[in-house]
Amino acid sequence: MQYIALDWTALVKSGKSFDFVSNVYDGRDGKIKNGFPLLLALAVNEGKNLTMPLLDKLASWTKPGFRSENEIINNVLDSLKERLLSVNGALSKKIILLLDAGFYRTVIVKYLLKLKFSFIINSSWRQKYYFNEQGNQGKNKNQTCRFN
């Protein structure tokens, strides 16, 4: 089994020479600072504490032409699928995407299903939804869903 983790993090910047900085959370001291949101895709080795960056996307909510965070995520998923397919059809192997609660959105789940990724999303306390293979949604509070 192989895993790929997707995560938003913050690249905090200081100084005045950076264009289009956004407000980001700095986990080191819990303060909001200038910087750039960074979306990372990391390969995770099973049973080991090793990760390898596969791709990253630097974002800016203040840059002209920015439309939505969902669009950035979908573009990264497209790039990730292309890279995995270019390596001997890697998607035919069991690869599971691991996503935190920030990715628990109808738009993202439907796009993951469209791209035929297997995935696990941490939904924490939020309402759970069941999505069938066609991406149709129905509420079901008590059902845990497995996506194949």
Image (tube, rainbow, N blue to C red):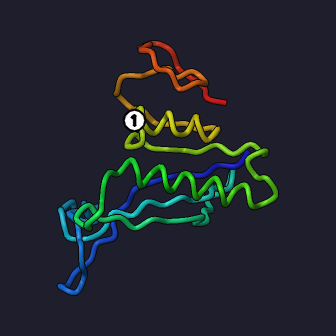
Q: Nearer the viewer, residue 36 or 49?
A: 36
How far across and how far down the image is residue 70, in percent?
Answer: 39, 47
Question: 146 or 114, which is in the foreground?
Answer: 114
Q: Quadrant of residue 67?
A: bottom left
Using the rendered view, name the quadrant where residue 32 is placed: bottom left
Q: Amino acid at mark 1?
A: Arg
Where's residue 14, x and y in %?
22, 81
Q: Is residue 19 above or below residue 37?
A: below
- Asked which quadrant contains residue 105, the reply is top left
Query: Circle 1 sits on which residue?
Result: 105
Q: Is residue 92 shown left or right of residue 139?
A: right
Q: Left or right: 10 with respect to 145? A: left
Could you tell me which secondary element the residue under label 1 belongs to?
Answer: loop
User: Which residue shows up at 64% across the image and 52% down it?
Assistant: 81
140 vs 52, left or right, is left
List the single residue furthest toward the front: 65
Q: Quadrant of the C terminus?
A: top right
The residue lying at 24 percent from left, 72 percent from top is 20
**Most foreground residue, 45 or 11:** 11
